[in-house]
Image: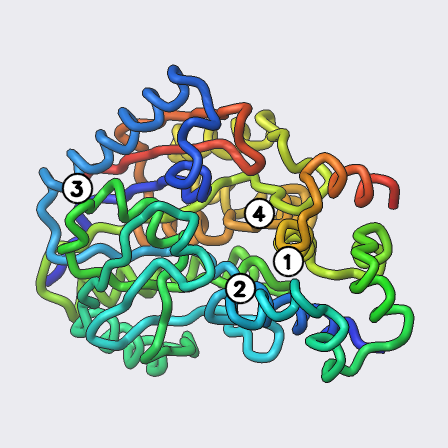
């Protein structure tokens, strides 16, 4: 389990637009090389913002991820406020 | 030898350029007026270069390599970052870096116990490009980009940032010949991605702006504790403001404009000038 690996995935798709497009088309495939626990991988692939926030993902970065995967601001806030 | 001739503070909320229609006409008008005033002051001061103090927004730096402070020392820097150029609505620009100041400051820091990181390949993200778009719209004033670590924790202390600012001032005075303006880009309070996103702790901002208006810099720096850094929100741009105070020395602002546009998800806009 590695918070760094979770955040590294988010950082990479945040900055690399081609990787981002590939991630959005096939998230499992792009997430595969990252050293993630089953719990982390599930949270990422299911867009479980609540769990990712609870894990300690940097909130600014988590917000960028939520935008990338199409989560509205109000839903994002609802999920992190529930933690 | 050299002189600090002007201090500026401006916001860098990407919505300012990407979604200006997202705020009321009145707020937008005030904001443009505020930026216009900063631009006017910069033109009047006619500096040889502009030091820009802000925090990189996970463009150049991340947990794999995260400096507390970093100077851009290449001949030029380009922005906005590829990740934002499609949305930011700030044209791509390549700005000259005042390498005499940047590299001189680097060496001065090494000799005086400020271990700057330095970069020959520094990308200017929206934290730089949004205010530069307004205060130097032709992008023709040489800049010195300075990253003040804030977004990733742990970051530097306020005491360290203030000392860094003092070193910058000392270097300009002792070893640079020319006029220097300094801009801090960012908000005192900003919680992008945090639970209070979309609202602003105006009391918190007024507390710190009040100390600036009174010229009570010692108290301003003293209050930037770990607790208050946390309270200031996720974006943590307060440390860049502290650094500016070290550069400017004891001074009272010439003008302060505070705008909180409710259409924004992040921070209020504080536009401040210090003329010397």
Q: Which mark is residue B58?
A: 2
Residue B109 in the image, given as x and y percentages of width and height:
34, 76
User: On the image, which quarter does residue B196 sit in?
Assistant: top right
Residue A22 in the image, given as x and y percentages of width and height:
61, 70
Q: In which quadrant of the rendered image does the N terminus of chain B lie?
A: bottom left
- Element on which disc 4 rests: loop
- Element on which disc 1 rests: helix
Nearer the N terminus, badge 3 or badge 4?
3
Q: Which residue is mark 1?
A: A61
Q: CA distance from mark 1 to mark 4?
A: 24 Å
* 3 or 1: mark nearer the eye: 1
Q: Chain of mark 3?
A: B
- Same-chain check, marks 2 and 3: yes
- Same-chain check, marks 3 and 4: yes
Q: Which residue is mark 3?
A: B42
Q: Chain of mark 1?
A: A
Q: CA distance from mark 2 to mark 4?
A: 23 Å
* 3 or 4: mark nearer the eye: 3
* 2 or 4: mark nearer the eye: 2
Residue B115 in the image, given as x and y percentages of width and height:
43, 78
* 2 or 3: mark nearer the eye: 2
- Same-chain check, marks 3 and 1: no
- Same-chain check, marks 1 and 4: no
Q: Chain of mark 4?
A: B
Q: CA distance from mark 3 to mark 4?
A: 28 Å
């Amino acid at each position: 389990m590695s918070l760094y690996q979770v955040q590294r995935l988010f950082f990479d798709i945040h900055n690399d637009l081609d990787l981002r497009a590939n991630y959005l088309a096939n998230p499992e495939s792009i997430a595969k090389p990252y050293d993630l626990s089953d719990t982390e991988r599930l949270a990422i692939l299911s867009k479980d913002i609540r769990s990712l926030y609870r894990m300690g993902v940097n909130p600014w970065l988590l917000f960028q991820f939520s935008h990338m995967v199409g989560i509205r601001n109000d839903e994002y806030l609802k999920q992190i406020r529930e933690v | 030898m050299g002189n600090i001739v002007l201090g500026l503070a401006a916001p860098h909320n990407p919505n300012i350029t990407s979604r200006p229609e997202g705020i009321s006409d009145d707020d937008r008008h005030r904001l443009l007026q505020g930026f216009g005033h900063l631009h006017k002051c910069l033109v009047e001061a006619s500096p040889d270069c502009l030091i820009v103090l802000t925090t990189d927004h996970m463009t150049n730096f991340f947990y794999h390599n995260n400096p507390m402070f970093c100077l851009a020392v290449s001949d030029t820097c380009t922005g906005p970052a590829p990740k934002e150029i499609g949305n930011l609505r700030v044209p791509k620009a390549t700005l000259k870096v005042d390498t005499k100041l940047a590299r001189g400051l680097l060496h001065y820091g090494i000799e005086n116990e400020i271990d700057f990181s330095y970069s020959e390949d520094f990308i200017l993200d929206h934290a730089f490009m949004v205010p530069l778009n307004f205060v130097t719209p032709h992008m023709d004033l040489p800049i010195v980009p300075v990253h003040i670590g804030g977004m990733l924790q742990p970051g530097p202390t306020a005491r360290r940032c203030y000392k860094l600012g003092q070193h910058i001032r000392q270097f300009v005075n002792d070893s640079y010949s020319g006029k220097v303006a300094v801009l801090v880009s960012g908000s005192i309070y900003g919680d992008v991605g945090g639970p209070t996103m979309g609202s602003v702790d105006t009391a918190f901002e007024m507390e710190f702006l009040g100390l600036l208006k009174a010229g009570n810099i010692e108290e301003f720096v003293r209050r930037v504790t770990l607790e208050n850094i946390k309270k200031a929100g996720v974006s943590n741009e307060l440390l860049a403001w502290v650094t500016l105070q070290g550069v400017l020395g004891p001074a009272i602002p010439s003008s302060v404009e505070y705008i909180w546009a409710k259409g924004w998800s992040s921070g209020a806009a504080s536009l401040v000038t210090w003329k010397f």
